[in-house]
Amino acid sequence: MVTGKTVLVTGAAGGIGAAIAEEFAGAGAQVALGDIDGPGVKETATRLATKLGLEMGQELLAHRLNVSASQEVEAWVEAVMTAWGKVDVVVNNAGIQLNRASLDLSDDDWQRVLGVNLDGCFYLCRAAGRHMVARGEGVVINIASIAVQFGMPRRLPYCVSKAGIAALTRVLAVEWASAGVRVNAIAPGYIETELVRYAFEQGHIRPEEITAKIPQGELAKPRTIGEVAVFLASDAAGYITGQTLVVDGGYSVFK
């Protein structure tokens, strides 16, 4: 499905990003992992190389990357181009959360969340998109959230950033379709990640209340999002573009 493709994944040191990287690597793609946690992303890449029998530098690359800095994003894309000669797929997964009352948000709070979640998504789309459009093919997969559908108290910059990602996805999809580039988003529901576990532990959300609202009765594993990403990058999804695919076990449609 994606054998031989070159794939860039942000926020790949752990959680959903690491799972996405693993699914692509396991499916035969060359995967470049980027994350602001430099040691963490290198450790993840090394773990995947050992687990999957892959070679660092040939089938896996790992870089420290601050997606909110456009120059770093541009340099990362060029480093992948130098190493592998092409960019086939990008997955904009890097994201941060903030639990704070809207009236208590500082300018820095607002700009930090939007900078990582939305600016970073745009920067990578722009940097990789130049190569994809010029080449006449490519796939962009942006990680949004079911937050685009709800008003979640104390999550203002997060919800705004994810709604922005959904809009960015639609615009780039129609703008780049004639150039052979597809752009879609995945909107995960509640996933078993450190971020969600922390929210449970801090009492920000109650696990029993969340699972009671999921018709399938459980949180998804991170690899579920990776599997969906591989599908969207494959030829099987060749007529799908501009969509935000909700993956939430029925949470957003349950009444």
Image (cartoon, helix red, strand yellow):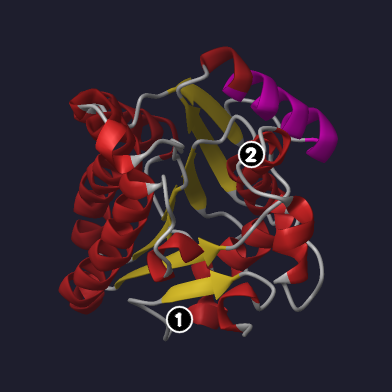
In the displayed structure, would residue 162 be above or below residue 158?
below
Front: mark 1 or 2: 2
Q: Against 192, is 57 above or below?
A: above
Tell me if residue 110 comes above or below residue 133 in the rendering. Answer: above
Under tag 1, what secondary structure? loop
44 in magenta: yes
State the SS at label 2.
helix
Q: Which residues are magenta?
A: 41-53
**Marker disc for residue 238:** 1
Apparent side of residue 90 relative to residue 208 in the rendered image (left or right): left
Give the main secondary structure of the magenta stretch. helix
Amino acid type, callout 1: Gly
Q: Which numbered marker is on residue 188?
A: none
Q: Residue at x 60, y 70 (%)?
A: 247
Q: Residue at x 24, y 41 (%)?
A: 119
Reply yes or no: does residue 78 show up in magenta: no
Q: Position of residue 98 (x, y in %)?
A: 43, 35
Q: Which residue is mark 2?
A: 199
Using the image as rendered, state which of residue 69 and residue 62 is in the foreground.
Answer: 69
Picture coordinates of residue 145, whole percent (x, y): 47, 60
Label 1 to label 2: alpha-carbon separation:
37 Å
Crowd tier of the residue under label 2, counting other residues whose Cα lies within 10 Å: few below 14, some 14–19, many 20 or above: some
In the displayed structure, does residue 87 sit left or right of residue 181? Answer: right
Q: Please indicate whether residue 233 sits to the left or right of residue 225 in the image.
A: left
Q: Quadrant of the N terminus?
A: bottom right
